Amino acid sequence: MGNVTIRILARELQLSAATVSKALADSHEISQSTKKRVLEMAAALNYTPNPYASSLRRKKSNTIAVVLPEVADSFFSQAIDGIEAIAQDKGYHVLVCLTHERALKEQAILHEMLGGRADGILISSCSETTDPSSILELQEKGVPVVFFDRICEELDTAKVVTDDRNSAYKATDHLIRSGCREIAFLTISENLSISHERIEGYKHALDERGIKFKMTDIIPCTHHAEDNIHLLKKILGKKDHPDGIIASVEKLAVQVYQACHELGLKIPEDVKVIGFSNLVTASLLNPSLTTITQPAFEMGRAAATLLFKALGNKGADLSQVVIPSELQVRDSTG
């Protein structure tokens, strides 16, 4: 059995991880018979203590971890800049960990943090996440956790978000005012709270303008560009294709441009496009892209500020912070 941990020993012995840890440390709180059982099992399974984790349990690591789904998205790169600005001022290192939108990878990263690699965690959930138990485990161990952008609503912890519902409402309303009546909404996950919020804002704007919402106008996309472009070409290739598209994720907006180019459709004449995006090159696209621009840097700064507040005061009252996004109108919506 490779990579034997205290948790594995605890499971085999049907003891708590805390009891096993204390037994291995020869704590006076643990009976000699239990210590003997633990040591025998440790020897049988070739358990090797992690000296790095042990040293970190004795003192602060002066490191915070930032757990992200990706860094290709310009939102996250700008958020890291905001986090770094606060962490450097506090004399802390920033450890960036990528989940690549995989729930198992996210769980493995968070489990590793239990060993003391970081004093606190900033996290933006991956699109597959449905089980918050890894976060709860960190909280039970006294590790502060702050969510930003992609949050887990059911957890009682600090969160930094933007006004996703209102932003999607503004995007949809702008397209309607620009003449659109068949507006498609592109999304990548049914699990993310930001997806729910943005879809609700989209539906609200349609309802206010007397446009009937159709479930078929919500287009689930994937994390694979080729699959998305194929899907978009199929949708946009129809005679009654959407006349407006909202890309709820930055990379989807670029893929809409590519699909339109391959089909010979003109933006904004044949289809108007708006995207949730922090691309600094949005104004340089042809045509320039109308965006909902999120305050990524400010959200990163705010999240890091809350985390250091929690590190300085374990009983700090940490509530949700909402920082508004901005609609930037450009040529892609006419």
Image: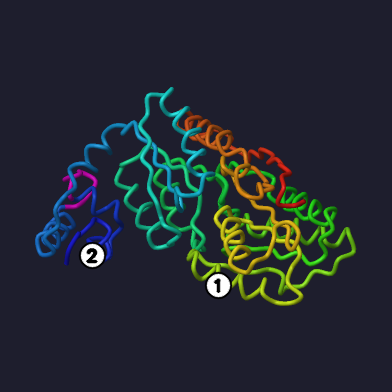
**Magenta segment boundaries in residue numbering:** 24-31
Q: Position of residue 76 (x, y in %)?
A: 50, 44
How crowded pointer 1 is (Cα within 10 Å; few <14, some 14-19, many 20+) is rated as: few
Residue bearing mark 1: 230
**Is residue 278 rendered magenta in the image?**
no
Q: Is residue 243 left or right of residue 158?
A: right
Question: Given contact means CB atoms under 8 Å apart, are the residues at marks 2 and 1 in contact?
Answer: no
Q: Residue at x 61, y 59 (%)?
A: 257
Residue bearing mark 2: 13
297 or 130, nearer to the observer: 297
155 or 251, nearer to the observer: 251
Disc 1 element: helix
Q: Position of residue 279 (x, y in %)?
A: 57, 44
Q: Is residue 282 left or right of residue 82?
A: right
| Amino acid residing under circle 1 | His
Viewport quadrant of the N terminus: bottom left
Q: Residue at x 79, y 67 (%)?
A: 182
Q: Residue at x 39, y 41 (%)?
A: 65
**Is residue 29 rendered magenta in the image?**
yes
The numbered disc on residue 92 is none
State the colouring used for the structure image.
Answer: rainbow
| Amino acid residing under circle 2 | Leu
Please say if 96 is above or below 263.
Answer: above
Q: CA distance from mark 2 to mark 1?
A: 53 Å
Q: Position of residue 141 (x, y in %)?
A: 39, 46
Please say if 194 is above or below 184.
Answer: above
145 or 58, nearer to the observer: 145
How crowded pointer 2 is (Cα within 10 Å; few <14, some 14-19, many 20+) is rated as: some
Disc 2 element: helix
